[in-house]
Image: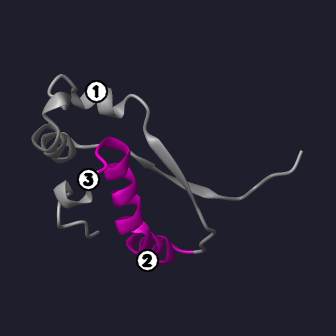
Amino acid sequence: MNTINRSAVVVIPAQPFLDWLHEADPTSAHLTLNDLRDEPTIYLLPEYDTAEEAHQLLQGLCKKIFEEQLKGWFRVPTAWPTDRTF
């Protein structure tokens, strides 16, 4: 069996995400934080050697990951939060 040395980041929504979703999409009012956390998204990361490299990598990927999460719940980009920084 071959081994792949990779790391992953697990994205688990927090309360501000649920608050935004309820505001952006009134049909989501029945959803709870546990509903959103039921199936978290996992992203494989490129290899890195140090914690600093990992931090820089996540900073570079943060916006794209955030937008993928938003798109998964509500596909109207104009309704997405404007601050999507690390």
* Magenta-tinted stretch: 50-75
Quarter in which the N terminus is drawn: top right
Q: Secondary structure at mark 1?
A: helix
Dot 3 surroundings within 10 Å: few (below 14), some, or many (20 or more)? few
Residue under label 3, please give it: 76
* Residue identifier under label 2: 56
In which image quadrant can residue 45 be found? bottom right
Amino acid tagged 3: Val
- Residue 56 lies left or right of residue 23; in this view the side is right
Q: Earlier in the sequence, mark 2 or mark 3?
A: 2
Q: Amino acid at mark 1?
A: Asn
Q: Secondary structure at mark 2?
A: helix
Q: Does dot 3 land on a helix, a strand or a loop? A: loop
Give the alpha-carbon distance from disc 1 to disc 2, as whole Å. Answer: 30 Å
Decide which of tag 1 and tag 2 comes sooner along the chain: 1
Crowding near pointer 2: few (<14 within 10 Å), some, many (20+)? few
Q: Which residue is mark 1?
A: 34
Q: Nearer the viewer, residue 18 or 8?
A: 18
Q: Is residue 53 magenta?
A: yes
Residue at position x 19%, y 39% in the image: 18
